[in-house]
Amino acid sequence: MTADRRSRVPRALAAACILTAIAAQGPARAAEPILQTEESDIVTLPPGGPHRVLVEDGVYRHSKDGRVYVVDLDTGRLLGMVQAAYNANVVADPAGKAFYVAETTWERGNRGKRHDMLAAYDPRTLEPTADIDLPGRALITPKKPDMAISADGHYVYVYDSSPTNAVHVYDTGLKSVVRTVDVPGCGLIYPWGNAGFSSICGDGSLANVRMDAKGVPALTRTPPFFVPDRDPVFEHSPDVAANGHVWFISYSGLVYEATLGSQSSIAKPWSIQEAAGLKAASDARAPFEVAWRPGGWQLAALRARDSHLFVLMHKGTFWTHKDAGSELWELDLKTHRLVRRIALAARSMMVGVTQDAQSRLMLTDDAGDLMVLDGADGKPLRKIAALGDALIFTAAPGE
C-alpha cells in the first residue's frame, strides 16, 4: 500500500463515523412554517360593457339551486354568480345600476314557512343592496314576463296568482312594495313607459294599467286580438319598455305588433313563413300539418336599434311549440322580410341578443353550453362549455 493510500483510509473512516453519529441523532428538522391569517375580501368587477350579460340557469334537476350567472361574451368567462332559488326571475335596471332577482324558499328546505323575496344586487360586487319580503309571487314554471322593470328603472313589477291575479309594484327608490294591482283573468307583465304595464288575458285581450303620479292605477281592456284555443301567443314574445312595443308571436307563426298604453293598439298580423317566401303555417284547426314553426323557451329576441327579430324555428306539427329550434331566422320588422336563416349546430331552446353595433347572439343546447354568434352574419365566435344545467333566460344591457 502506498503512503498516499494509507493517508486516505483514516480520513474515510473518520467521515463514516461522523455520518453514523448524525444518523443516530435522527433526520434534520425544518423550521415550522409561520401560518398566515386568512383574510376575506370582495372582488369588484370593472364597469361592464354591452357584452356583459346575465344568464339564468333554472337547474331543473334540482331547481332549488337555481342561479344567475354574470358572463363576459367576449372572453367567454364566467365572472360571478348569485343564487336564484326555485323558479326565480331576473331583470336588469336599464341604466345598469342594479339587477333584481325574485325567488322563493322554505325555512326547512322543502317545507315550513314560505318566503317570497326580491333582492337587488350591485352588478360589480354582486353584493345585495336590498332584500325584501314580497306579498307573494307566481310560483310556476319560470316565464320571463313574470317580472319586469319600468323604462326608467323606478318600478319593478312582480306577477302573483295567489289568491288572485295581481302585480306587486316595487319602488326601487323606497325599497319597498308600494302597491298591489289586481288584473283579474290576466297574467304576465309587459311594461310600457315609466308607470304602466299590460297583461295578457284569458279571452285573448290585453289589460292595460297606468299609474298616476301618486301611484294610483287605472285599468282598461282591449278587444280580443287572438283566439286562445285556436292560435295562442307565446308568453316569451319580445318587448321594448321604452316605447311600449311588443311583438306577440303566435304558435302558428303570426306576428302581432302591439303598441301598449292606456289604449293599446294591435296591428294586423303577418306571417313569419310568408316573410321567408313559404306558405303560412296552419293553426289548431289543422293540427297535423307539418311546417316550419316557432318554438322553444326564450324563443325570440329583438335587436331594437335596427328592428331585427330573431326567432328559433323547427319543422313540426301545430302542438310542437315547445320544441327546440334547429334554425334561427332573422327578420326585418319594418319590411316583414326574412334577412337570413342560420342553421344551428345544436338545437336551442333559447336565443338572446345584445343591443350594440357589434351585437352578439346567444344560444344554448342540452349540455348547458352557451354559444356566442356574431350578430352581423350569424357565424359562431365561441362556445362557453357547460356553463349551466338549464339555461333559460338572458338579460343584456339596454334591453
Image (cartoon, helix red, strand yellow):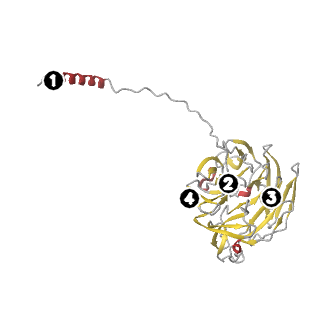
- Residue labelled with disc 4: 367
Quadrant of the drawing holding the N terminus: top left
Callout 3 secondary element: loop
> Which numbered mark, 3 or 1, is in the foreground of this view?
1
Q: How many marks?
A: 4
Q: Quadrant of residue 235?
A: bottom right
Nearer the N terminus, badge 3 or badge 4? 3
Decide: is 4 above or below 83: above
Q: Residue at x 73, y 42 (%)?
A: 130
**Circle 1 residues within 10 Å: few <14, some 14–19, many ≥20:** few
Which is nearer the eye, 103 or 289? 289
Nearer the N terminus, badge 2 or badge 1? 1
- Residue labelled with disc 3: 243
Q: Residue at x 84, y 60 (%)?
A: 261
Callout 4 secondary element: loop
120 with respect to 210 (left or right): left
> Which numbered mark, 4 or 1, is in the foreground of this view?
1
Q: Quadrant of residue 239?
A: bottom right
121 with respect to 366 (left or right): right
The CA span between labels 4 and 1 is 79 Å
266 with respect to 108 (left or right): right
**Circle 3 residues within 10 Å: few <14, some 14–19, many ≥20:** some
Q: Say which mark, if any, is on residue 116.
A: none
Nearer the N terminus, badge 3 or badge 1? 1
Nearer the N terminus, badge 3 or badge 2? 2
The CA span between labels 2 and 1 is 91 Å
Nearer the N terminus, badge 4 or badge 2? 2
